[in-house]
Image (cartoon, grey):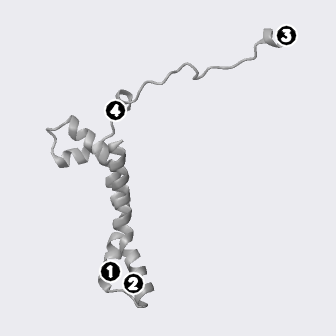
Amino acid sequence: ANDSAKQGLLYMSAFLLTYSWSGITLLSRIIAGEASSKIIYIFTAVFLPLQGFWNFLAYIRPRFVKLRRGHPNLSFLSTLNTAIFIEEDSVLNRPKRQKRWRNRRFEPNDDAIKRS
C-alpha cells in the first residue's frame, strides 16, 4: 500500500509540476486582468511538454527500485539502462497460468439432452 501511495504521489506531482504554471497564468489574467510575466510563459513552455517525461519517470520507478534492491552492485546509470531497455524474463517472473480450460472444446452432452 505504501508503494502505491508513492506512485500516486509521483503521478500527481508530475501533473502539478506541469500544469501549475498554466494555472498561475490563468489566475493572473482573471485577477489582474492583464497578461502575466514572460517568466511564467517560459516556465509553461518548458514544463508543459515535459509531462510525458515526468510520467515516464514515475512509470519506471517500481522496476528501477526492484532492480536496485536485487542488484546493489549496479551503478545508477546501469540500473536505469536495464530498467528502460532490457525486458525481464517473463517466464520466470510471472505466475504460471492454469491451462486447464485453454483449447478445450465444449461439446454437448448427448445423454443429458436425451433425458430432458
Closer to the camera in the image, 30 or 71: 30
Q: Closer to the observer: label 2 or label 4?
A: 2
- Residue visible at 33% across and 59% down? 54
Among the two numbered marks 2 and 4 on one chain, the one whose residue lies closer to the N terminus: 2
**Which residue is labeled 2 in the image?**
28
The answer to whether the residue labelled 2 contacts the one labelled 1, judged by CB atoms less than 8 Å apart, is yes
Q: Position of residue 33 (x, y in %)?
A: 43, 90
As measured in the structure, the alpha-carbon distance from the residue carrying label 3 to the one carrying label 2 is 80 Å
Label 3 secondary element: helix
Q: Amino acid at mark 4?
A: Asp
Q: Position of residue 108 (x, y in %)?
A: 75, 17
Q: Which mark is residue 40?
A: 1
Report which quarter residue 31 is drawn in: bottom left
As measured in the structure, the alpha-carbon distance from the residue carrying label 2 to the one carrying label 4 is 52 Å
- From what the image shows, is residue 63 above or below residue 9? above
**Which residue is labeled 3 in the image?**
114
Q: Closer to the observer: label 4 or label 3?
A: 3
- From what the image shows, is residue 26 above or below residue 69? below
As measured in the structure, the alpha-carbon distance from the residue carrying label 2 to the one carrying label 1 is 10 Å
Neighbour class for label 1 at 10 Å: few (<14), some, many (≥20)?
some
Q: Closer to the observer: label 3 or label 2?
A: 2
Q: Position of residue 109 (x, y in %)?
A: 76, 13
Camera sees residue 114? yes
* Quarter occupied by the N terminus: top left
The number of discs equals 4
Report which quarter residue 52 is drawn in: bottom left
Neighbour class for label 4 at 10 Å: few (<14), some, many (≥20)?
few
For residue 114, side relative to residue 16 (left or right):
right
**Which residue is labeled 4 in the image?**
89
Neighbour class for label 3 at 10 Å: few (<14), some, many (≥20)?
few
The answer to whether the residue labelled 3 contacts the one labelled 1, judged by CB atoms less than 8 Å apart, is no
